[in-house]
Image: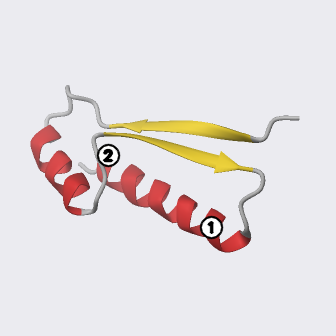
Amino acid sequence: MREGYSILLELSDADPFFDKKKRLLNDMGFDVKEIVHIKSSLDRDSLSTTLNQMLQIARIIHLD
């Protein structure tokens, strides 16, 4: 059985707003390329924190 998964969230360098989004990501403590590890052993609070971070990153990456 698999212990967990890794998900890559990456801001495309072809994005027309790359510089602005990169600055937003950096201001929030993230990079343009983030690997999120989700393990089956995470407790509820840790999983919630991880999913919230993924959501924050995804929202910035998909801003228009």
Camera-side residue of 16 and 11: 11
Q: Residue at x 55, y 38 (%)?
A: 7
User: Residue 41, percent across and down?
Assistant: 77, 56
Q: Which of marks 1 and 2 precedes in the sequence?
A: 1
SS type, badge 2:
helix
Camera-side residue of 9 and 46: 46
Q: Residues under labels 2 and 1: Cα distance?
A: 23 Å
Q: Is residue 31 above or below residue 28?
A: above
Mark 1 residue type:
Ser
10 Å crowding of disc 2: few (<14), some (14-19), many (20+): many
Asked if the residue at tag 1 contacts the one at tag 2, i.e. Cβ–Cβ closer than 8 Å, the answer is no
User: Residue 11, percent across and down?
Assistant: 30, 37
Q: Is residue 5 above or below residue 27?
A: above
Mark 2 residue type:
Ile
| Marks 2, 1: nearer the viewer | 1
Q: Is residue 1 above or below residue 37?
A: above
Q: Is residue 62 visible?
A: no
Camera-side residue of 29 and 62: 29
Q: Is residue 33 visible?
A: yes
Left or right position of 46 against 33:
right
User: Residue 22, percent across and down?
Assistant: 18, 46
Left or right position of 5 against 13:
right
Quadrant in the picture for residue 12: top left
Residue beneath disc 1: 46
User: Residue 50, percent across and down?
Assistant: 55, 60
Q: Is residue 27 above or below residue 10?
A: below
Quadrant in the picture for residue 33: top left
10 Å crowding of disc 1: few (<14), some (14-19), many (20+): few
Residue beneath disc 2: 61
The N terminus sits in image quarter: top right
Q: Residue at x 20, y 26 (%)?
A: 14
